[in-house]
Image: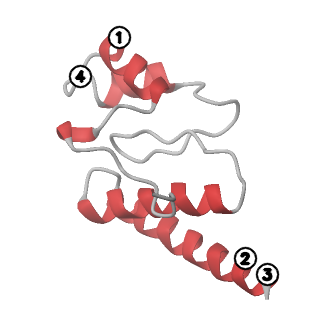
Amino acid sequence: MLNEMKRELERILSNARKILRNTGAATQEGRSALQIERSVNRLLGRDEQCICPECGYRFRGSGWDGIDAHWRARHESVMSYTEAWPLIKAGAYRPSGRSPLPDLFAED
């Protein structure tokens, strides 16, 4: 039973990543997919991956390596990197001033 649940969560995670890749994190669909991905990863006991909160780019390698160059090249017009980085690092940055994404499986 537990293995079946894990397989289903992996399937949901895979679909969420496809949506995020196709739509980006700035769309409503992308934000929902990002919310699902973060929540499912927590359920599966995985570390949260470093994903650009503005466009959904997934950083490979060691943590946030490359965020400064990525941000300055693509998102500097939205907010300067020096302003955005502390928010991103704290998990508080929200694209276009949107509200935080809650954990879908958090206990009240």
- What residue would you read off at disc 2? 6
Which amino acid type is marked by label 2? Lys
Give the percent coordinates (x, y) of residue 19.
41, 68
Secondary-structure class at tag 1:
helix
Q: CA distance from mark 1 to mark 2?
A: 40 Å
Decide which of tag 1 and tag 2 comes sooner along the chain: 2
Q: Residues within 10 Å of mark 4 (few under 14, many from 20)?
A: some
Kind of residue sitting beneath label 3: Leu
| Mark 1 or mark 3: whose residue is earlier in sequence | 3
Q: Which one is earlier in the sequence, the residue at label 2 or at label 4?
A: 2
* Residue found 70% across the figure and 30% down from its top: 62
Real-space CA distance between mark 3 and mark 2, rounded to the nearest whole angstrom: 6 Å
Position of the C terminus, as image quadrant, is bottom left
> For mark 1, what is the residue?
82
Residue occupying image coordinates x 46% and y 26%: 90
Residue identified by numbered label 3: 2
The image quadrant that residue 74 belongs to is: top left
Question: Which residue is pictured at 66% across the width and 73% down the height?
Answer: 10
Q: Position of residue 58 (x, y in %)?
A: 53, 45
Q: What amino acid is at disc 1?
A: Thr
Q: Are marks 3 and 2 in contact (CB under 8 Å)?
A: yes
Q: Nearer the viewer, mark 3 or mark 2?
A: 3
